[in-house]
Image (cartoon, rainbow, N blue to C red):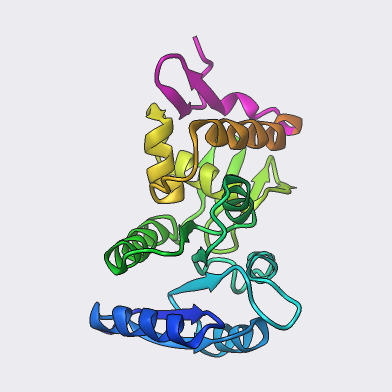
Amino acid sequence: MQNETVLVVEDEPAIREMIVTTLEMAGFDCLQAEDVSEAHNRVVDARPAIILLDWMLPGGQSGIDFCRRLKKDELLSEIPIIMLTAKGEEDNKVQGLDAGADDYITKPFSTRELVSRIKAVLRRSSALSGDKPIEAGGLSLDPMSQRVTADGNSVDIGPTEYRLLAFFMSHPERAYTRTQLLDQVWGGNVYVEDRTIDVHIRRLRKVLDPYGYAGFIQTVRGTGYRFSTQTQG
């Protein structure tokens, strides 16, 4: 079985080498880049399984800029990204997740935690990357193109709301707590609070509302949320 490849985008050589050594010992193959330009070339040429992306990078483009750029590229947007940074403030963490990052780990971190986070994101990414469109009522989600349509009309949806909807549509008619949604959609990222889930639920409903499908995202009092095509009682 071929090892999965991790692209490590980090401008500090000592940190980059430590991460690469850790990941190679854990059975991953590694590619390295120290700025956005080099990282983009690596992504296009090698299509890594996952990207470890530092927030602060030289050359005028930050890691968050690169994350947004990748998530807007239909050919590269499915590659999961873990933001890696010394920025510990909650607003930075939420900003990274909103830009499309799949997880967020703050320096300093343990090597065991890093490996565990990578494996968790890869498992979740694999689970959400089926190739068959998912249909619910007039709502359709195509994992291959990562497009959502409502009654044949293209829906403009952000990366975080897309992942949330993909999970919901893959697991209909079941109530999930906010903690379960954090684990399934964000990888159990401990920095994301319950209220952040509520924000993304509101955004998802707002995206679906013009097409009449906001009601598919239902609040389950005392539990959390569920996706259902049935009218809520």
Q: Residue furthest top?
A: 233
Above or below, 74 relative to 141: below
Q: Position of residue 33 (x, y in %)?
A: 54, 87
Horizontal side, residue 188 vs residue 161: left or right: left
Q: Position of residue 174 (x, y in %)?
A: 37, 29
Above or below, 54 relative to 230: below
Magenta extent: 211-233
Q: Position of residue 215 (x, y in %)?
A: 60, 23
Horizontal side, residue 21 vs residue 169: left or right: left
Q: Which residue is at a point 36% across and 65% down the rendered structure image?
A: 118
Q: Nearer the viewer, residue 55 or 164?
A: 55
Q: Which residue is at a point 38% across and 47% down the rendered structure image?
A: 188
Q: Is residue 216 magenta?
A: yes
Q: Which residue is at a point 60% across and 37% down the rendered structure image?
A: 200
Horizontal side, residue 50 vs residue 215: left or right: left
Number of numbered discs overlaid on the protein picture: 0
Q: Is residue 65 magenta?
A: no
Q: Position of residue 179 (x, y in %)?
A: 39, 35
Q: Which residue is at a point 29% across and 84% down the rendered structure image?
A: 24
Above or below, 224 relative to 82: above
Image quarter of the N terminus: bottom left
Residue 25 is drawn in which quadrant? bottom left
Q: Nearer the viewer, residue 119 or 8?
A: 8
